Amino acid sequence: MSVFEYVALDEKGREKKGFIDATGLTAARQQLREQGVYPVEIKQALQKKESALAGILDINLRQKVSAKEIAVFTRQLSTLLGAGIPLVPSFTVLLGQTKNPLLKKILAQIRGDLTEGKSLTASMENFPRVFEPFYVNMIKAGEASGTINLVLERLADFSESQQALMSNIRAMLIYPAVMFLVGTAVIFFMMTYVVPQITEIFSDMHQTLPLVTIILIAISDFLKVFWWLVLLLIAAVIVVFQYATNTTQAGRRWWDAVCLKAPVFGTLNMKIAIARFSRTLATLLQSGVPLLAAMAIVRNVVNNVFIGDVITKAAKDVEEGQSLAAPLTQSGLFPPMVTEMIAVGEQSGSLEKMLNRVANAYETEAQADTLALTSLLGPLMVLGMGLIVLFIVVAILLPIFEMNQLIK
């Protein structure tokens, strides 16, 4: 059974688009005619993949499925299954209301696989760029335990909480970012257009200009002529930085160390990482994923090499029979409150509950720290731009004052 994407006309000549399951192209045309529509174009939606790599290569790089869309899909699927609708009909319903073309094709392929008797886990594994290992492992645990509806509900709750946390942080950073961009644009306009017109009056003066004025004129002339070079250098720095931190191990370790040790920002990054570690591990354990497998997944979720190394070592110690709290305490990275709550959770058999409490506490602290940081960034940016404007004003006024003194 294959999935075909079609364009057809109904009896009134109106265009209809959709997907249909059929054994072949001829069978697909026949099914459409039986439904009272006349096919104009039929093509196979997605070819069956024998490997995850093949699935990656098939995806159009210009299309993307966002984390928000996956969260919405998960919540809708959980709702449909909770209402007693079987899995295949649930995917049929979701296909009819999905707007993203790429996600629509993927759901059609999954529905085709389910019709052939494959598990939901096996089908989702063909699309690793859309369904991450964390997601697939939770689905696998849900299918194995017969609690797929409950697992999907937890997945939806987890995805929505993470989306809410990151959305709140981004929203708080919008104001400082806009202020920085507008301030930079205003200062650039002053240096390349306003300052040159004012400093032209100094060219006819046969006197030595103050050092601050000479510096201002030099900067203004450079920006006026070589502004393109400044933009090119900024772009080059960004490209080199991304290459070094994303593709080289040394660059990644250096940047992760900076993220943890930087004043103010280091503490904030650590709190976000702890919240993500705790929430993800708790969600996996509640869904029936074994502790060692869950820690292997969580290692990649925290997005920091050093914290990931601590989790890897902790997993090895747990495999040898030690507690989870002990290696986390020895690392020195995790705060005592976190390790103490994990230890209490292990001793009382309520590890998932304690991890959720840790996540709630650190998510709240991360949002509070971000709010305080953004409240401080605004005045600091105003102060910095004020100093730059003061430098420009002083550099322009000094020669004028000196000229007035000579006239007197």
Image (tube, helix red, strand yellow):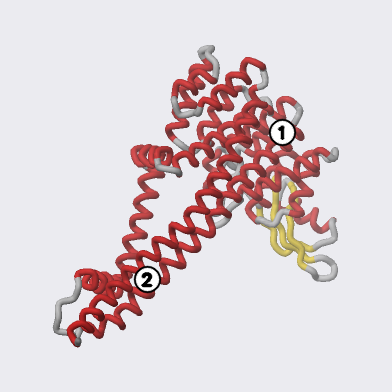
Distance between the alpha carbons at the discs numbered 1 and 2: 53 Å
Q: Nearer the viewer, mark 1 or mark 2?
A: 2
Q: Position of residue 339 (x, y in %)?
A: 54, 24
- In the picture, the quarter occupied by the C terminus is bottom left
Q: Position of residue 400 (x, y in %)?
A: 25, 81
- In the picture, the quarter occupied by the N terminus is top right
Does residue 204 appear to the left or right of 233 in the view shown?
A: left
- Determine the residue positioned at 23% across, 84% down: 404
Does residue 89 appear to the left or right of 301 in the view shown?
A: right
- Residue on which the image places disc 2: 188
Query: Crowding near pointer 1: few (<14 within 10 Å), some, many (20+)?
Result: many
Give the mark count. 2
> Which mark identifies residue 192?
none
Between 148 and 334, the one lying in front of the other is 334
The outermost residue toward the top is 321
Q: Earlier in the sequence, mark 1 or mark 2?
A: 1
Picture quadrant where residue 83 is located: top right
Asked if residue 326 is positioned above or below residue 124 in the image, the reply reads above
Does residue 157 appear to the left or right of 387 in the view shown?
A: right
Q: Position of residue 229 (x, y in %)?
A: 30, 66
User: Hey, what amino acid is under mark 1?
Assistant: Val
Between 173 and 114, the one lying in front of the other is 173
- Residue on which the image places disc 1: 151
Secondary structure found at label 1: helix
